[in-house]
Image: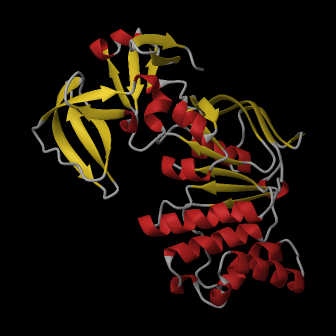
Amino acid sequence: MAELQLRDVRKSFGAFEVIKGIDMEVKAGEFMVFVGPSGCGKSTLLRLIAGLEEITSGILTFDGQVVNHLVPSKRGIAMVFQSYALYPHMTVFENMSFGMRLAGADNKECKRRVRAAAELLQLTPYLERLPRQLSGGQRQRVAIGRAIVRDPKVFLFDEPLSNLDASLRVATRIEIAKLHRSMQGTTIIYVTHDQVEAMTLADRICVLRDGVVEQIGTPLELYERPNSVFVAGFIGSPKMNVLSGSFAQPYKAHTIGIRAENLQIVDQGGWAGSVVHSEMLGSDSYIYVDVGVGEPVIVRENGTSRHQPGEVVQISPDHSHVHRFDAAGRSIGRAEMSGAHHELQIIVKL
């Protein structure tokens, strides 16, 4: 395993700067996930770490050693791509051992490592099959196995599950989580646009926006204490409800945010709006309510909703879970209700 440090790392393509000065640390043995919208620079940053793109300026170190000018093969990394990149004419065994054979490993060692990785990934019955004889999930596991046998210091995953259907994504996500636990402290950097993957896999998440780091923290820290409207709206499913104007004024904020589970439909005394849509998911339901702010406010209810489109309802927020943001979109703490009189108090919780 390896510890990575990035100090003012930048990447430009001609006059266009994609990565705009990133300072961060990935701890040895950590599962770090890069998330952000399309075009934010997360895949470019991964390629800089891999050595597939040259750093324009700044310093990248592995365990204190500067690796800016090291070729990928000398960095001790293994990368798993979105497209499985398997050789179609080779068996699973041959695909998994190909990199080792190129590096000059003997046949005995190749067989030992491949069989150990195949057992870990439940691929042993498929070692003599060709890629076309495998499912999408099995092919992705072969690609992961090919990385494992190289015994790298750092695993790099570039949106590895985006080509899989929903059920296979869940199954393969579980396999990746088990893999990290079983490999005793392997450092993993994982890029995804799917924040559910990020929340369920990461030790820490790095949220990127327009080539800069917006916030780094554990999944729970980002969910409960987003430092900006952007992070609040990006982390969590469904995303946080964001309101301004007359909704934010009582909280002495430019904008407020509140999650669906911290709202409830009440008989009176809340925000008035009309139901525009209900999503019933079995264990709970999401009610979309138009309160006149553009996007509907989303309310989560347990069980099956009985609210119909067009129905006028009242929504009440849990004041202790209202996030407050200034005009620049930065967090200025939460609001709470005090004691028996239920007076609104502004309390900073950063």
Choose top left, top right, bottom left or bottom right for residue 295: top left
- Of the 4 image quadrants, the one containing the C terminus is top right
Q: Is residue 247 above or below residue 141?
A: above
Q: Residue 210: horizontal and vertical position, in percent?
A: 53, 31
Is residue 116 something that shows in the picture? yes
- Of the 4 image quadrants, the one containing the N terminus is bottom right
Colouring scheme, one of rainbow, by chain, secondary structure, one colour: secondary structure
Q: Is residue 349 above or below residue 102?
A: above
Q: Is residue 87 left or right of residue 327?
A: right
Of residues 130 and 341, the one nearer the viewer is 341
Question: Residue pushed farthest front?
Answer: 340
Residue at the image point whose x is 23% and y is 21% from the top: 269
Of residues 23 and 259, the one nearer the viewer is 259
Q: Is residue 273 left or right of residue 232?
A: left
Q: Is residue 27 left or right of residue 139?
A: right
Choose top left, top right, bottom left or bottom right for residue 256: top left
Q: Is residue 126 left or right of residue 55?
A: left
Is residue 296 something that shows in the picture? no
Q: Residue 273: horizontal and vertical position, in percent?
A: 17, 28
Q: Residue 129: horizontal and vertical position, in percent?
A: 61, 89
Residue at the image point whose x is 56% and y is 48% from the top: 198
Residue at the image point whose x is 68% and y is 86% from the top: 124
Question: Residue pushed farthest left?
Answer: 310
Q: Is residue 115 above or below residue 288?
A: below
Of residues 92 and 240, the one nearer the viewer is 240
Residue at the image point whose x is 50% and y is 24% from the top: 228
| Count of marks overlaid on the render | 0
Q: Residue 293: horizontal and vertical position, in percent?
A: 24, 24
